Image (tube, grey):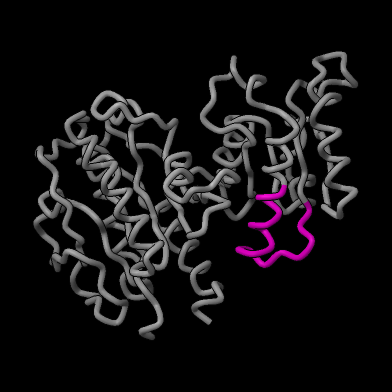
Amino acid sequence: MSKKYFPIVITCGDPSGVGPEVAVSAWKALRDEIPLCILIDPNFLPKNINVKILDQPPIASDIERSSLTVIRHKFVEKRVPGKPNPKHAEAIIKVIERGVRFVKDGQCSAICTMPISKSVLKDGANFPFPGHTEYLAHLDGRKNYGMMLVNKYLKVVPATIHIPIKDITKYLNAELIEKTIKTTHQELTSRFSISNPSIWISGLNPHAGENGTIGDEEQKIIIPSIKKLRSKGYNLIGPVSADTMFYGKKRRNFDAAICMYHDQALIPIKTLDFHSSVNLTIGLSFIRTSPDHGTAFDIAGQNLANPTSTIEAIKLAWNMVKKDQKYQ
């Protein structure tokens, strides 16, 4: 493998969850084709695999396929699978920070993050961010960012992310919708090489508001935002009723769908293919992917976790790395 490539760094996420085990499974599946290193306390890893422990990421050509390359990060408490520990919170946050720094400094080519528990981080470190996505954007100094879920069937982007349903209309406005459309368009053209991408936008209310009879957000903010950006050349359709835009015939007509809130976007893509769906953070200066599932404390340590989403997340990141101009 050429020295111009640098490894993908996998962050451990909450060590009490399935992150460490699915990361190891993904490494076993991909070690012959993708250079990987994992940022974790070595004591959290299985004893039946060979590891090479370092303090900094190596270049790709120095990575040994027979050994898992581990970037050491000390945790103060032991890992107990299935038993979340708020005392892990500070170290979990620092692992994310280090992983981002490795990528931004050019030591790693992309980051793939294992799942975290927001409640653990809040209880243990007063973590002020709603989730991984918002924290990564903060570390990158980005205001225009989003969460794109990707699988072979769909690409979906929720305009509001980790917001309680009762508060959605407090956050949803024309500026946010326009930023989401622009960021999605940019990601589709730059990361996925889609020329003039077709983007469909859902309504917020049932039946996209039915001309204002079931809510007026479509009339007041969604339609004007679509018209404004369509006049600037964006290829947009909407607002489309969210309960009909994802069935087979329709979903083949767009490159990505933007929805107004989290579950409106994630339910269809996870229903179509739960295990292969990937979370991609859009709008960052670096490539970040993650599996599209949580910590799964209930099955941690039992070798029941399906690593497919993590494998697909790493493969998506690597494909994007190879398209990046600096690696040409």
In the figure, is residue 313 to the left or right of 262?
A: left
* Of the pair 277 and 58, the residue shown nearer to us: 58
Q: Position of residue 317 (x, y in %)?
A: 47, 62
Q: How many marks?
A: 0
Measured along the vertical axis of the image, is residue 227 above or below residue 100?
A: above
Residue 113 in the image, given as x and y percentages of width and height: 37, 50
| Vertical order, 319 against 257 (above or below) | below
Q: Residue at x 75, y 21 (%)?
A: 205
Is 130 contained in the magenta span? no
* Side of 264 relative to 198 (left or right): left
Residue at position x 57%, y 38% from top? 271
Does residue 306 appear in this view?
Answer: yes
Q: Residue 182: x percent and y percent?
A: 71, 49
Q: Where 68 sits versus 184, above or below?
A: below
**Magenta span covers which residues?**
182-198
State the image quarter where residue 118 is shown: top left
Q: Is residue 187 magenta?
A: yes
